[in-house]
Image (spheres, coloured by chain):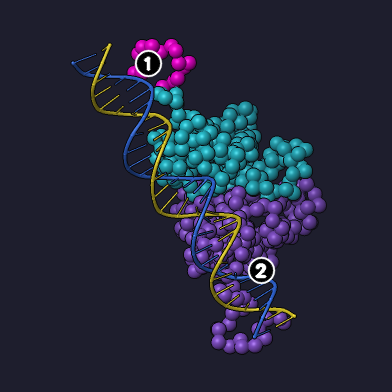
Chain colours: A purple, B cyan, C yellow, D blue
Amino acid sequence: METRSKKADSPPVRATRYHHGDLRKALLAAAEAELAEKGVEGFTLRGVAKRAGVSHAAPAHHFKDTRALLTALAAEGFARLGALSAERVGNAGTDPKDRLIASGLGYIEFASANPALFKLMFGSDRPVAADEALHEKASGAFTILIEAVGDLTGAPPFDSEAGIRHVAAAWAIVHGLAHLLIADKMSFLEPMLERDREAVLAGILERITPDMRNG
Amino acid sequence: METRSKKADSPPVRATRYHHGDLRKALLAAAEAELAEKGVEGFTLRGVAKRAGVSHAAPAHHFKDTRALLTALAAEGFARLGALSAERVGNAGTDPKDRLIASGLGYIEFASANPALFKLMFGSDRPVAADEALHEKASGAFTILIEAVGDLTGAPPFDSEAGIRHVAAAWAIVHGLAHLLIADKMSFLEPMLERDREAVLAGILERITPDMRNG
DNA sequence: CCGCGTCTCTTTACAGTGTCAAGATTTATT
DNA sequence: AATAAATCTTGACACTGTAAAGAGACGCGG
């Protein structure tokens, strides 16, 4: 609507922006790579800049702070976490119990595939907890789980204290399993997981459901 | 046995060591305070040294690294976590179910009282995971939970795959609840918790137990 | 009682970090 | 085409962790 009036042919595509193309997006990608390689503690803004091929002060024009960059990255993580859970639920058939367990398996799969990002999202003090976009994405991811619980119990979970306890318990067991797995604290499970990871995890998550029907 | 032969009266007490008294212990205490105030990310070795009233390079003689200091601190944390869980179990009467829930409540209480330390113990990449003392203390804390599960099911949990699943599920729900609470992700529980924290948490942890009897 | 080595701590130095300010360069606007 | 605005670079600063070398305090053998 407003960009690319004339001579938009020699540079390949260049979505919207100027020198770099889209440095903001490139920085987010570089930050995720840096995070995955170095962990939350070893994460370095200068390293991110180098990875993106720009000077060490360039990120400042797109993210006020290192915290701001990490906050944006965490928000993106919540979006992907929610998307993965939702996708798993969509492929899970019609039994509400299966669907709830599937959403949990998606949650755990995300944590296992992106341990440093997951820790950033939940464990770290660095992202700004008050950030609005972050909060929104986090709530979106959370909604998948709430809906799955509601489908199983047959009532909106937040209408009763029992429903709230259901949600808390379901989230706790899923999150705890995910977190302990990526913290390498569940070595005693490893042999079983290597044999049949999904089934073993589903067998543990089964415990979410038993007394929910009459919640 | 080997120190304090003569003239051990003018300096107050001075347990074992020289200039400072016991700098190693003082550094651990200072590190815990620094951690509680600044969080895992804001933690600074120089800040610890200043807190203990020594120069910034003094800690090097007691801890090779910042990592080594944090590892020792995490080990201490696991010891206290185990002790608190055990104490709660000891005060919990004879019903195995109550005892298991009590150990979980102790776990959560520790996390709530020491959030930064708890995150360091489980969430951080900084402590050296391979450290032997750390591993031992962590296993000790974990043992409390395993025993409580075994008492409830009537069999050593690690003798069967069902028992292993019981342990994993119990630990996951306790740990997940603790972690989400200190990550401020369970705001929807706050009103209930303010009314009757222990009872609400116990009501959620109840879910650990139902199908364990015939495990 | 006294030098001597050893351990504890301090001082100094250095490479890296995040952030800020000022300049250079490219794009957009009028 | 000229001016304004944006993106990015360079340079600087305070702060970090760590290493090396020096100062101070202690125990031990004479």
- Please state which amino acid type lies under the numbered disc 2: Gly
Q: Residues within 10 Å of mark 1 (few under 14, many from 20)?
A: few
Front-most of residues A29 and A5: A5
Q: Position of residue B40 (x, y in %)?
A: 55, 45
Q: Which residues are magenta?
A: B1-16
**In the figure, is residue B19 to the left or right of B144?**
left
Q: Residues within 10 Å of mark 2 (few under 14, many from 20)?
A: few
- Chain letter behind tag 2: A
Residue mark closest to the camera, 2 vs 1: 1
Q: Which mark is residue B4?
A: 1
Q: Is residue B4 magenta?
A: yes
- Please state which amino acid type lies under the numbered disc 1: Arg
State the CA–CA distance, disc 2 to disc 1. 73 Å
Residue pictured at 68% horizontal, 63% vertical: A95
- Chain letter behind tag 1: B
Q: Position of residue A114 (x, y in %)?
A: 54, 60
Q: Which mark is residue A156?
A: none
User: Which residue is most to the right?
Assistant: A159
Residue pictured at 45% horizontal, 29% vertical: B23
Residue pictured at 54% horizontal, 43% vertical: B43
Q: Is residue B103 magenta?
A: no
Secondary structure mostly taken by the magenta-highlighted segment of the chain: loop
Q: Which mark is residue A90?
A: 2
Q: Position of residue B142 (x, y in %)?
A: 51, 39
